[in-house]
């Protein structure tokens, strides 16, 4: 299918997927992270916890900071956008099953009827997808390149419920999830990992990615531990065993404990439903159907629907009406966000004695699967068959396209698809939301936008500009740190920085877990400079790390980002230490610091009126370039000799590079030097610059290296 508007269309026509849109003319149209600007935040603590409460934290290992409000909407502009009408191609993704639950793969466009808000719409575009598992390896493969991932590829969330579960069920859930990853996932499928617990709330451990090795590592490390809430104590074995004891000793202790547990369970159940509702609202923005594989024993039947043998603490046999309202709303939100739930019961209800069915959660899981357009599975012990069924159902689907007159008002449209062939049932999209200005996004929608920008290999909600990022490992105060600098050219600054923007600097360790997070809020910068540089100084641990900086304009959603991989050395005791060089240029830039007290000119002792960091490539023909150096010694104010060698990648030998020291400044044990390197004329290519520092008259030697690209 060619996702293009028809000839003669207005310039503002768009192509839409089932939850978002892409404008043909390519014009661009999180909850704010409140933290002390420039403060590095360790994951898995307070910062991670709060975002998990709204349903989307990263346990990339995940973001965690308290949220705040974003920029107030500009009413005049919003009203203009709200009533602007555009013509757009809407894409709807559906599955079709026969009466035996098998996928129907031989339908044509004429077999379908489509209704938008009750009105029949002609289907103008049609695609059929049949996905085989021929490409599936036994061991998860590296991520698929971003260019090969489309908005209609399969998307799975492995959802582990730690609240309505028990230790055995959690272990079975992990086994079933790993089997699904190993046997049923295609290389271009994107997978995420989510969990819910009474104490931690909703946590997104890994955002959608085709890096299935990473997903496997996350699942393998998941366990009950601190995640188990009190709700798990209400399973039938607990009640049955304690009733036997009470009957033997003539006590009503179980009844009193059970009444207290009921109150706790309902509180946790309402938390479960309300937080998943918020997650579903944010998932509206992700294109395509989101397949959620939920491992849970479910909210007990008596709590939602009433019980025959068990009444709640209020004396009602009809369940809790307030809890039902929360649960029904959750199912509705999942359906409207095109999130089909494949509910896998970890405590088989089919084998439970009839008198214990009130305590089972199969009713809740059945409703969730049905209302969301998914499927219910009663017995997790048959996980291999379950996984094959999920693959079969999600592996054959249709994409239907039709044109709509769209308003940017954010309103919901009901979509209904019928198949003329008898005995067929259609599952999939229940509707969609019209787009709206970014300033009108909810906090959770903005948060998902930030996560998509920061983490996704191929962002689905935007097309961010990729800009140069330089990350230098240094030893500052005897401890390892990273100086990370993101360069934004003037042509992007107005879109990325105007009025109000938010930036995040994230450091990932070699396992892909988040080591540090530093937020930065930017307000009304001077946009007249040629370049802008966001500068972060981040304490970190030694080892191989990945540094990413993402910047998002909080009025428009426009984003830029950069990434660099580097090795941080261990801060060992040495007589002499040489940090990597900071290359300099004489162009004028505006430095924006996350940590104002730790500026580049203070760290490297250069005059910001004369120089600024050089990010990116050297131009071909360069004969000399300038750098700032930091040399730390255990001796007071030693004399330092510097030498340099330059080698082209693939070259046979290195050559010496003359060094001229232009300026020298002593700051305690650290010498800060401004130097010129006479490289001779450089041709396009990749080079390694090696620098060696030696104490005059001493034995101490230090060495560092930097990669240089000439274009």
Image (cartoon, helix red, strand yellow):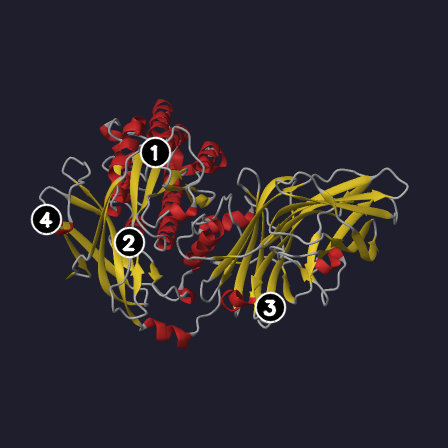
Cα distance in 3D space between marks 1 and 3:
48 Å
Q: Earlier in the sequence, mark 1 or mark 4?
A: 1
Quickly name the residue at label 1.
Answer: 135
Residue 477 x %, y %: 75, 48
At 86% from the left edge and 43% from the top edge, which residue is drawn? Answer: 695
**Classed neighbour count for the residue bearing mark 2: other residues with Cα under 10 Å, few (<14), some (14–19), many (≥20):** many
Front position among marks 2 and 4: 4
Residue reaching furthest top?
Answer: 248
Secondary structure beneath label 1: loop
Q: Earlier in the sequence, mark 1 or mark 2?
A: 1
Sequence-first disc among 4 and 3: 4
Whole-percent x, y for residue 169 in the image: 37, 30
Determine the secondary structure under disc 2.
helix
Tell whether label 4 touches label 2 (CB within 8 Å).
Answer: no
Query: In the image as oriented, which residue stretches furthest toward the left?
Result: 422
Q: Which mark is residue 50?
A: none
Q: Which residue is mark 4?
A: 420
Left or right of 499 in this view: 210: left
Q: Which residue is mark 3?
A: 530
CA gap, disc 4 and disc 3: 61 Å
Asked whether, in this view, residue 293 is left or right of residue 684, the answer is left
The relative height of residue 120 versus residue 299 in the rendered view (above or below) is below
Is 210 or 290 nearer to us in this picture? 210
Residue 514 shown left or right of residue 271 in the figure: right
Q: Nearer the viewer, residue 75 or 566?
A: 566
Q: Quadrant of residue 7?
A: bottom left
Mark 3 closeness class: few <14, some 14–19, many ≥20 residues within 10 Å: some
First along the sequence among labels 1 and 3: 1
Q: Residue furthest bottom?
A: 76
Residue beneath label 2, please? 336
Q: Vertical placement of 270 versus 100: above or below?
A: below
Tag nearer the camera, 1 or 4: 1
């Amino acid at each position: 299918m060619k996702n293009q508007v028809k000839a003669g269309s207005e310039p503002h026509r768009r192509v839409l997927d089932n939850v978002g849109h892409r404008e043909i003319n390519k014009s661009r149209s999180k909850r704010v992270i409140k933290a002390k600007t420039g403060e590095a935040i360790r994951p898995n603590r307070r910062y991670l916890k709060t975002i998990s409460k709204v349903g989307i934290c990263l346990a990339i290992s995940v973001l965690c900071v308290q949220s705040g409000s974003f920029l107030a909407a500009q009413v005049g502009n919003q009203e203009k956008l709200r009533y602007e009408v555009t013509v757009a191609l809407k894409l709807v993704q559906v599955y079709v099953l026969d009466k035996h639950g098998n996928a129907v793969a031989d339908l044509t466009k004429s077999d379908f009827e489509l209704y938008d808000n009750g009105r029949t719409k002609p289907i103008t575009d049609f695609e059929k997808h049949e996905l085989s598992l021929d490409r599936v390896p036994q061991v998860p493969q590296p991520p698929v390149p971003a260019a090969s991932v489309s908005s209609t590829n399969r998307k799975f969330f492995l959802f582990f419920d730690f609240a309505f579960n028990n230790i055995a069920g959690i272990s079975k859930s992990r086994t079933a999830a790993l089997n699904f990853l190993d046997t049923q996932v295609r290389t271009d499928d994107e997978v995420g990992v989510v969990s819910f617990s009474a104490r931690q709330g909703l946590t997104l451990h890994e955002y959608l990615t085709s890096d299935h090795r990473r997903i496997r590592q996350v699942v393998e490390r998941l366990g009950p531990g601190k995640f188990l809430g009190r709700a798990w104590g209400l399973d039938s074995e607990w009640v049955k065993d304690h009733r036997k004891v009470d009957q033997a000793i003539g006590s009503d202790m179980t009844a009193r404990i059970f009444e207290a547990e009921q109150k706790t369970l309902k509180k946790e159940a309402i938390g479960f439903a309300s937080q998943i509702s918020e997650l579903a609202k944010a998932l509206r923005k992700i294109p395509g159907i989101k397949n959620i594989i939920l491992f849970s024993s479910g909210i007990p039947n008596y709590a939602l629907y009433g019980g025959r043998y068990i009444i709640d603490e209020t004396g009602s046999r009809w369940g809790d009406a307030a809890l039902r309202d929360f649960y029904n709303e959750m199912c509705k939100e999942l359906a409207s966000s095109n999130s089909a739930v494949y509910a896998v019961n970890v405590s088989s209800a089919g084998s439970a004695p009839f008198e214990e069915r009130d305590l089972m959660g199969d009713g809740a899981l059945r409703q969730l699967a049905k209302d969301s357009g998914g499927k219910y599975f009663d017995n997790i012990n048959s996980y291999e068959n379950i996984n094959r069924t999920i693959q079969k159902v999600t592996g054959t689907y249709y994409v239907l396209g039709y044109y709509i007159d769209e308003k940017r008002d954010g309103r919901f449209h009901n979509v209904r698809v019928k198949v003329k062939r008898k005995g067929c049932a259609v599952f999939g999209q229940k509707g969609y939301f019209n787009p709206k200005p970014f300033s009108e996004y909810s906090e959770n929608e903005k948060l998902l936008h930030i996560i998509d920008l920061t983490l996704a290999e191929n962002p689905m909600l935007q097309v961010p500009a990729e800009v140069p990022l330089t990350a230098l490992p240094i030893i500052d105060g005897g401890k390892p740190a990273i100086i990370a600098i993101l360069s934004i050219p003037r042509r992007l600054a107005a879109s990325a920085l105007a009025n109000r923007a938010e930036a995040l600097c994230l450091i990932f360790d070699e396992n892909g877990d988040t080591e540090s997070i530093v937020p930065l809020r930017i307000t009304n910068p001077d946009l007249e400079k040629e370049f802008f540089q966001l500068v972060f100084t981040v304490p970190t641990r030694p080892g191989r790390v990945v540094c990413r900086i993402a910047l998002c304009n909080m009025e428009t959603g426009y984003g830029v980002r950069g990434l660099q991989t580097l090795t941080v050395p261990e801060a060992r005791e040495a007589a002499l230490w040489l940090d990597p060089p900071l290359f300099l240029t004489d162009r004028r830039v505006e430095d924006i610091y996350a940590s104002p007290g730790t500026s580049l000119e203070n760290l490297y002792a250069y005059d910001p009126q004369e120089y600024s960091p050089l990010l990116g490539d050297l131009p071909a023909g360069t004969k000399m370039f300038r750098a700032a150096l930091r040399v730390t010694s255990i001796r007071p104010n030693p004399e330092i000799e510097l030498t340099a060698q330059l080698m082209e990648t693939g070259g046979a030998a290195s050559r010496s590079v003359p060094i001229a020291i232009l300026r020298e400044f002593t700051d305690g044990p650290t010498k800060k030097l401004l130097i010129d390197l006479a490289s001779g004329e450089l041709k396009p290519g990749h080079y390694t610059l090696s620098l060696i520092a030696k104490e005059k008259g001493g034995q101490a030697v230090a060495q560092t290296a930097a990669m240089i690209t000439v274009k």
